[in-house]
Amino acid sequence: MSNIKLNSIFKTVCIASDHAGYKLKEIIKNHLINRDVSIFDLGPYNEQSVDYPDYAKRLANRVKFKKSEVGILVCGSGTGMAISANKIKTIRAAVCYNLKSTRLCRQHNNANIMAIGSRLTKKSASLKLVEIFLKTKFEGGRHLRRIKKI
């Protein structure tokens, strides 16, 4: 792993997972720390079984109240975390499963949380998706009008 600085457009990033996503969360967290990104880990801190909605809500509220600009959620599929996070007002969580979906969720939807499926996404791909999410800017314009309708 390289110690090259990641030029993230965000200053504060938080991360959380469930037990299925724990190992990948740790890999992502360490990758970002090595790239000089300020990251706040909301747990869990081991592989014991936990309920993903609790961690999704914890992270989403941190983003909602601007303690972190964006968040990364990791569970088995990414879907449960995204559904749970999207219950919180002002949150736009997207399941990121390839380069295009990740880029578009930022450019067109101004997603403030990405969700990754640890059982569906390889480690190397996950790290690329995280970097794309953290580097991609929202395009605004017609997309802002649509987001205001959500």
Image (cartoon, helix red, strand yellow):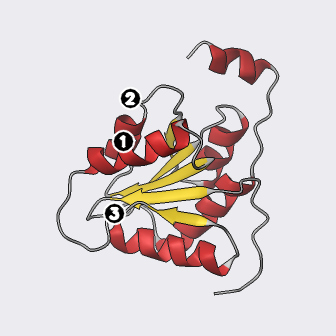
Q: Residue 87 carries which label?
A: 2
Camera-near label (1 vs 3) is 1
In the displayed structure image, the side of residue 39 where residue 144 appears, left or right = right
Q: Earlier in the sequence, mark 2 or mark 3?
A: 2
Q: What crowding class fits label 3: few (fewer than 14 Cα within 10 Å), some (14-19), or many (20 or more)?
A: some
Q: How crowded is mark 2: few (under 14 residues within 10 Å), some or many (20 or more)?
A: some
Residue 1 falls in image quadrant: bottom right
Which SS class for mark 2? loop
Q: Which amino acid does label 1 sit on?
A: Lys
The type of residue carrying mark 2 is Lys
Callout 1 touching callout 3 (CB < 8 Å): no
In the picture of the structure, the residue carrying the numbered disc 3 is: 119
Q: Is residue 107 visible from the viewing direction of this image? A: yes
How far, Cα to Cα, is label 1 from label 3?
A: 21 Å
Q: Which of the numbered marks, if any, corresponds to residue 57?
A: 1
Q: Do the residues labelled 2 and 3 touch (CB within 8 Å)?
A: no
Contact between marks 1 and 2 (CB within 8 A): the answer is: yes
Q: Residue furthest left?
A: 49
Q: Residue at x 45, y 41 (%)?
A: 60
In the image, 129 versus 99, the foreground residue is 129
Q: Where is residue 131 in the image (x, y as percent from the top left)?
A: 67, 63
User: Which percent across, then down, holds residue 142?
Assistant: 78, 18
Residue 117 appears anywhere in the view: no
